Each structure stands twice: as C-alpha cells, then as structure tokens.
Amino acid sequence: MPVPETREFFLDASRCIGCQSCVQACAECDTHKGQSMIQLDYVDRSRSTQTLPVICMHCDSPTCAEVCPADAIKRTEDGVVQTARKPRCIACNNCVLACPFGVPKMNTRMNLMMKCDMCYDRTSVGLKPMRASVCPSQALAFGTREEIAALRPGARPVNTFQFGAQTIRTKVNVLVPKAAANEIIDVTAAMYEPPLGRDLLDDMSEPGRSPA
Amino acid sequence: MTREVTRALGWASAVTAGLALLILLGSRKLEHFDAALVAYTFSIVFATFGLTYRYTMWLSRPPTALYWRRGWQAFLLGGHRLRNARSWFARVTLDVLLNRFILRRDRLRGLTHLLIMWGCTLAVAITFPLVFGWLHFGPVPGNLSMYQAVVFGFVAFRFPHDSWVAFLLFHGLVWASFLVIAGVMLAMRRRMREEGAGAVQRFAEDFMPLLLLFAVSVTGLMLTASYTWMRGYGFTFISLLHACTVIGTFVWLPFGKFFHVFQRPAQLGVSFYKDMGRLGDKAHCRRCGHAFSSRMHVLDLIAVERQLGFKYEIPGSPAEHYQWVCPPCRRASFAVAQGLLWRDQRGGAPLSQTHEPQAMPAQANPGLGSGPLGPEDAENFHP
C-alpha cells in the first residue's frame, strides 16, 4: 500500500533539542531492527549544544541510486527511496559518499548499506514514522500540510536544495520562515558559515559562571 | 539502437553461439544429446542470451563500468597479486560458498539462503551437463551390472548399478529438491511473518522466485514418486508440468531476482578496490579538514557523477566539488543553511570563528546501533 500523498514529512532541524528520542525510536523500525538510521550530530561539540537530526530526504532523482553500481536502491511509485535491496547491495560505499545530505550508513560486517526508508512498514499503512511520533520539539513532524500550517503558522515547507550547481528536489520538506523569500535552500552557500547559537565559551566567561 | 544495446546484443549472440558450439562438441555432434531434453536445452540457451544481454547492459552503466574496471585493476595490482589471490580464495570461501555476510545479517536467513543456494547449485550441476549432452550414463558394454558416466564422450568412472553410489547419483535431483524446498519454506515463513519484510516485499521480486523454485522441486519429486511407487501413473502429464516449471524458471532468470546470482560476484571486485584505496592517500574534507574515504574513491565518484549528469561542482568555493566534503559536514551544512533562515525569528548569533577550517561535527550517539555501523562509517563519519 503506498504512503498517502496527503501526508508528508517535515523537518525543522533548528528546533532539535538533541534528546535522541528519534535515534532510539528509529531503531524500533521493523525494516532495520536494532539499527538507528537517524543521523544526529553536534554541529560544534566544543562550543555549542546545537544538534541536527538528518533523515533520508527521499530525493526525486536520488544520487545514491544513480551511483549505485548494483542497481540496489529503488524508488517506490510513492516516492520513497528504499534502503538497499539485500540480495543486490555489494557494499561499495558509493551511496554513503555520494548522498548530498550525508544519510546512508554502511554495515561493513553485513556487506549492506542501510538507510531510512521513512518507516515504510508504518507509513504505508497510514501510521506516522517512529521518529516523528516521538519527537517532542516537532523538529521531525509527519502529517498533512493543513495540520502543519495549523501547528506552525509562521513556517512554510520548502523541498528544493542547491548543492553547488546541482539542484535537488525531495519528498521530505524542510520548514523555513513564512516571511523568507527562499524557494531553494542553498546548502553549499552555508558550508563555511558558522552555526547560529550561543557560544558555550561565552557562558563560561561570564562573571559568576566560571567552571571553577 | 544505441551503442550499448548493439554491444549487448553482440555479446549475447557471441556467448550464446559459444554455448551452442560447446553443446555440439561436448555431445560429440549431438551423438549423446538426449532429444527428450531439447526443450530444456533451448530454454537454457535463451536464458544465456538474456543473461548476457542484461549483464552487458548492466556493465555499461557508469558506476558499474568503473567498478568493473577498477576491481580488475586492483586485483591485478603489481606487487599484490599473491596476496590478492589468497584474499580471493578466502573471500570466495567465506562469503560466496559459506554465505558469511548473510549469516551475519540473520542466522536463519543465512541458513535459508544456504539451503536454496546449494540446492540450486547441485541441481544445475546435474541437469546442465545432462541437457547439453555433456554427460550421460549407460551400462558398461558386456557387463550389464555396471554403469558408467560418460563426460564429453570420455568414460569418467564406473559403478555397480545397485550400489549406494548409484543410488546417490540417480537421486541427485531429489536431494537437491529437499534442500530447495526446506529453504523455500523458511523464506516463505519469514515473508509471511516478518512485518519489516512484509512492508517492502513485492510479488514479482520476492514471491515469484520462491514459487518457481517450489514448483520445480515439487513436480520433480512427483516424477520420482510416480515411477518409484506408482508404476508411472500420470508420468507424461507430470513430466510436461515439470518441464513447464523449469523452462519458466530459466526464462525468468535474466529478468527477476535470480539475476543477483550473476551480479553478486561484483562484491569481490569491490573488496579489492577497497584494499587498493587503503594503500593510497586519504581524502580530506574541505570543510573540517579531517580524513575520510580514500582519495581514489572520491575522484572516481566525481567522474561517475559527471558521467551521470550531476553537477556538484561548486564554482568559486575552496571545496571545488561537493564530493570533497565529508558526510558529517554535509549534514552540518544542511542544518546551518536552514538555521540561518530562522535567524530573525529565533535569534542567536553566529558562533565566532575561532579556527579555520570549520569544526568537525560529532555524532550525538556513537553507540552500538545508533552511530556508525562499522569501521567504514567510523572512518567516513569520524565520530
């Protein structure tokens, strides 16, 4: 059964509080039992608490699938880019290195690439993906556009990204401010930009907040 | 007709013609060819054409072509050939013959695959030489209590017709079908019980091969049962039914899941490619400066992406090409790009640039099952 067209995934990484609920919930998924497919990173561990959850964005023209020499990555008719077909994946690592969002993982012992397939066991029967059902800050949300508009009136979805000269459209949406003029999020333009936040070192240097 | 199609048709025709020639030679100009098996022979010849065509088309895809070339280069790398030969033997034994990597995925799945794989291998090893006329059995002239196996027209060995060797040999396909049926049962059980498998499986891709193998095995056993215990009851009908299932399976070979049998050995080439990568320079991320994959792999991927029409070049950036950015820095750049758009609403100030290059992102939970899934991830994600 296909994932209902009306229900979409919305990612708002800057709302992430780093609680790791998604990491744990993802490991419950039946299609990759015990292995979490969420990539949750600290942007700058020494100076900031900012975390960023990254999930498969399910590209319209998936680079991972195109560079796969074994034809192991397939996109379903409902636009979900599935994890590698187990009989075919030859564990070459092309997809891990080529994904513009840095999503796939390589299980070296099993000779198998693994990645998020949008909890296909759940979404294909109308349920929310595990990670969206547990995220307390709505950094990861799943629902209709109307539901998201009601929950987040100041935000709107964008699903087009720029990587150098390459434009990528995805099934997963990223939330940007409603007032922002951007129809495309230029990822490579921000590559050398420092993240926003409050520097932990500044906190430490404030009077009365010395670690000593 | 594109160049790739023309080349694939050429290879398919050449390999099929080669097989036909071998059939003629091996059966001594069809002297030993069993005419009753001609339908099987033609279905295998058709499958050979289809498999070669698909394999050649598959090899013409830019990433596959590159790995094919690089795999052989790595295997034949000067100064490493002896070590590579040893590695090849170990990898073929452990991964191909013993299915080590499948057993690591799941022991029951590994057992399932071993049963099906060895059942099919045994069946192919028996039937192909028989239907090509390369092998036939017959009584030893002048001694009717002895049988002989004739391979390519030469007597290979002799055995008493009522010996256990004869029993094992003449029932070879029965043993093969026992293995296949047990494997198919286990596979079906998993596909019907596991929710994960149930979510992503497709009839044509996942059930059809199992049904075909089951049909071939069961109808084959029915033939044995018919002539052993039922005085040949329904033998003609069952043999036609069996022929249909076998021919259907061979015709399906190039199109469905069975094609992985021919794709899978590419894994060996990949392992030698990775060995070669470890001998050379590392790539260094042009955002955080840390080493990740092999430089050779990054350069090869840049070439493949260009062939595929991707334009990940970054004009005016010190990175030059997005492939020079490690996966964690890709994720960080993605989040930073989105976060910057919210600056006016959510506040925050850019963290001061204290060092060049950018800080290396770190995985929040590098623990078992949550972070890297192996040494290659550990290298690429450098947690």
Image (tube, coloured by chain):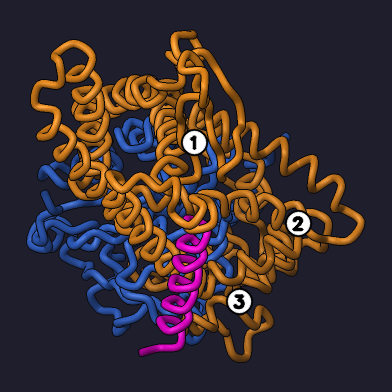
Do marks 2 and 1 share a chain? yes
Q: Which residue is mark 3?
A: B302
Which hue is chain B drawn in?
orange
Say which amino acid is labelled 2. Phe
Q: Which of the pair B152/B253 is nearer the observer? A: B152
Say which amino acid is labelled 3. Ile
How many labels, in total?
3
- Look at 35% across and 44% down and name the residue there: B34
Say which amino acid is labelled 1. Ser
Chain in blue (letter): A
Residue A34 appears in the figure: no
Q: Position of residue B115 (x, y in %)?
A: 41, 25
**Separation (CA) of disc 3 from disc 1:** 29 Å
Q: Chain of mark 1?
A: B
Q: Which residue is mark 1?
A: B370
Magenta span contains residue B315 = no
Q: Which residue is mark 2?
A: B75
Marked residue nearer the N-terminal end (2 or 3):
2
Boundaries of the magenta span: B1-23
Marked residue nearer the N-terminal end (3 or 1):
3
**Separation (CA) of disc 2 from disc 3:** 22 Å
Query: Helix or strand or loop: what does disc 3 sit on?
Result: helix
Q: Chain of mark 2?
A: B
Q: Position of residue B135 (x, y in %)?
A: 49, 39
Residue A28, numbered circle? none
